Image (cartoon, rainbow, N blue to C red):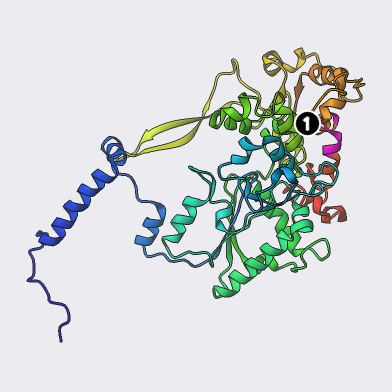
Amino acid sequence: MELIRRRKPLHQNEIPPQELDDVDDKKTKKKIASFPQYVTEAINGPVADPPGVKLQNEGLKAKHPVVFVPGIVTCGLELWEGHQCADGLFRKRLWGGTFGEVYKRPLCWVKHMSLDNESGSDPPGIRVRPVAGLVAADYFAPGYFVWAVLIANLARIGYEEKTMYMAAYDWRLSFQNTEVRDHTLSQIKSNIELMVASNGGSKAVIVPHSMGAIYFLHFMKWVEAPAPMGGGGGPDWCAKHIKAVMNIGGALLGVPKALAALFSAEARDIAVVRSIAPSVMDKDLFRIQTLPHIMKMIRTWDSAMSMIPKGGETIWGGLDWSPEEGYSPRKRKLRDNIGQMSSRHDNETIKSKGQLNYGRMIAFGKDAEEKHPSDLKRIDFRGAVKGTNIANNTCDVWTEYSDMGVGGIKAVEEYKVYTAGDILDLLHFVAPKMMARGGAHFSYGIAENLDDPKYSHYKYWSNPLETK
């Protein structure tokens, strides 16, 4: 018996009346409901379908489990235990979301977001922990997505929480301490094993971002290393459980902006915060010492030291050369054949006049940045007498700069230019306690012999130049 009444056959070019009404109705609704999109399409042409829609139209379905590994600062942190000033904030986000507590109680917020300056872990009476689940890093703040768009596109082809996992961790801690304090590495191992087993043996695809790339590099060494230092998974654990690792902006060799953050807190990210929320930086939110408060807090985050540039001048260049020598990345916007806007990086040779040398990572003054090495007059800061800082007794915010004295600060300035070969000595000079903690967890060199037993220690696991 025929369950669906069939229409009279149509001419091949004829559109069924009902479908014609639906098309017209959809177009009208689109114009009314999304006027900005209509204007954009009128100028630039049709907006391309999201990748998830394209994959769905091609018939692709979820297969391999996907693990997201957030980078530094992009994972939400919530309060589990705090001092009296933090009453009412139990399991409320201190990092991520609206950042409302920064405005309401800024000094209390800094105290709870800082780690212990000696141990690099929890200060007494304070427990701040990573948010769990995909919501931990889908959005950094309202309107600023991190993983949300990728999650939404994967959902189009059938992915859901049982096949997607956010490897949330406390990004302030050194990598090994995420295991010591929170057992995070063990949780990642268990979740990957469960996802692979429950998906018919399909191996996991790992997608780390920024610092997450070196965090997961550390994990891969940890999971195969014998206990108690490692996870005891055996030498073939990664081969059995991981299909591929797809880094997004991985900081595998470090990033120069980490130097500015550790050296003076005046990093590019601070400038971004100033542009997004000027009241945080420009309105004396922390009374009159905003940057010292931020610097004091950042210097307790051992993870920041994981992104100090690795490999020295061999990788990053020196006073008179850098890998980018002769080239300058430049964005050029082009219209493609369907009127859409796209961008690409086009390296073009630039004139030698006024050419920047990116091997000079820190320079005091434009002259020091541009002068020929033979014309630079530098006084070595190493071993300089720091002297006494007369402000120590009255400074409300103690940082290691308070111990440098005028002589130490002058010695740093008189060296003029710092390359990748100088930066470790510089940071040891201005922040010896911070670097003593970092030196126990991270290394920045190039291995001469990877068969040397010392490279089995976890401090080398996040440096691709010192690990297999």
- Magenta residues, start to end: 429-435
Residue 324 point in image, percent of width and height: 62, 30
Q: Nearer the viewer, residue 395 or 227?
A: 395
In the image, residue 3 above or below residue 464? below
Where is the N terminus found, in terms of image quarters? bottom left
In the image, residue 100 above or below residue 404? below
Residue 324 visible in this rendered orientation of the protein: no
**For the residue carrying disc 1, how many other residues have a C-alpha within 10 Å: few (<14), some (14-19), or many (20+)?**
many
- Magenta-colored segment: predominant secondary structure: helix
Quadrant of res 389: top right
Kindly identify the residue that appears in the image at 46 percent across and 36 percent down. 344
Residue 412 visible in this rendered orientation of the protein: yes
Q: Nearer the viewer, residue 442 or 234?
A: 442
Where is the C terminus found, in terms of image quarters? bottom right
Mark 1 — residue? 423
Q: Nearer the viewer, residue 107 or 45?
A: 107
Kindly identify the residue that appears in the image at 74 percent across and 54 percent down. 178
Quadrant of res 321: top right
Quadrant of res 300: top right
Residue 60 point in image, percent of width and height: 41, 64
Residue 256 left/right relative to 151: right
In the image, residue 324 above or below residue 161? above
Residue type, numbered disc 1? Ile
Residue 453 point in image, percent of width and height: 87, 56
Q: Secondary structure at mark 1?
A: helix
In the image, residue 444 above or below residue 226? above
Image label count:
1
Residue 405: within the magenta? no
Kindly identify the residue that appears in the image at 55 percent across and 57 percent down. 134
Residue 146 point in image, percent of width and height: 53, 47
